[in-house]
Amino acid sequence: MAGRFAPRPARTSTYGGRGVVSGGGVPRQAPAPGKVRVWVPDGPLDVGLVLGPLRRGPGDPTFRATPDGSVWRASLTPAGPGTLRVAVRGGEVRGEAWGPGAEWLLDRLPGLLGADDDPSAFVPRHRLLAVTRHRRPGLRLGRTGLVLESLIPSVLEQKVTAVEAYRAWRLLVRAFGEPAPGPVPDGLCVMPAPRTWALIPSWEWHKAGVDDKRASTVLRAVRVAARLEEAAGMEPAAARARLEVVPGVGPWTSAEVVQRSHGAPDAVTVGDLHLPGIVGFALAGDRDADDEEMLRLLEPYAGQRHRAARLILLSGRVPERRGPRMAPRGYAGF
């Protein structure tokens, strides 16, 4: 009967890994508040539009948008893992960061949110783009200053459906990444380090739905991770050239990377399954446009072709699908 009156074990409620002991136990020390930086942009800023391209699907473990309007990102910086929370209040941006990479992330907060971008350099030549820019004044092209965190998911997106690519990224980051530092939303993770990517067993790639070709490209990239990260300090064209030295990384992938790592306004994506038809339909009513025609239509925006493509995508003027979506392929056991 003695056990009947034994004190209950303390219960732990967690919020993103932060433990707070209740039920009579000794409270654990709450995590220290993060480092903070407040920045005032020099014009309209829509954080969702700026950071949205960094999100790899609705279940991306490295990205979270919360109901209070905050955006959380977990990154592997040169200084180590870091978590950044971005919120806008009253025209001010408040960045709060945790972990060894906190200062690195806060130092680059303005650049991440497009401080180095010049939206005024874009001159609309089509009414559709003029109207969309007017409706989306907060669009800026941000730069992360990180290459591998955009390169690996871009490789996973090569020639598969978005659903397949997002699933692969989600499963691999959750399985081999590490919990993001700080009092973060549940499930937020930092992507694996290069050495960890290199040690992922072949069957884990298969379970995530990644074929040998894409897995091999990722493995080749992480072996030269330091050299690739140096590309963040190069001009976009030189950075793309360095990336494309890696077998399996072509113009489509390198453009997708520098759009995010550099905020490159002219890095239009060539080789995409859908983009030429979307651009052709929006600017010329041609839903069958190919890459050559897309580039011809975007020529008036030389230097700003990626921004033009983003505005087209934001306009909502896209052709109706003629057939069913390409179905994701099945994988044994899933």
Image (tube, helix red, strand yellow):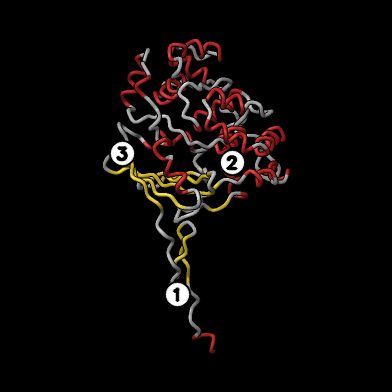
Q: Is residue 281 above or below residue 72?
A: above
Outermost residue on the bottom side: it is 1
Q: Which residue is mark 3?
A: 40
Kindly report the distance in space between the C-alpha atoms of the residues bearing marks 1 and 3. Answer: 42 Å
Q: Which residue is mark 1?
A: 26
Label whose residue precedes the other's in the sequence (2 or 3): 3
Residues at discs 2 and 1 in contact (Cβ within 8 Å): no
Kindly report the distance in space between the C-alpha atoms of the residues bearing marks 2 and 3. Answer: 34 Å
Residue 97 is situated, as x and y percent measured from the top left of the image, at 43, 49
How many numbered marks are there? Answer: 3
Outermost residue on the left side: it is 90
Q: Is residue 281 above or below residue 198?
A: above
Dot 1 lies on which element? loop
- Residue 20, quarter of picture: bottom left
Residue 269 is situated, as x and y percent measured from the top left of the image, at 53, 22
Q: Is residue 200 above or below residue 153?
A: below
Please tell me the numbered disc located at residue 169: 2
Residue at figure coordinates x 62%, y 49% from the top left: 176
- Residue 166, quarter of picture: top right
Side (left or right) of 3 relative to 314? right
Type of amino acid under label 2: Trp
Label whose residue precedes the other's in the sequence (2 or 1): 1
Type of amino acid under label 3: Val
Kindly report the distance in space between the C-alpha atoms of the residues bearing marks 2 and 1. Answer: 39 Å
Side (left or right) of 66 relative to 55? left
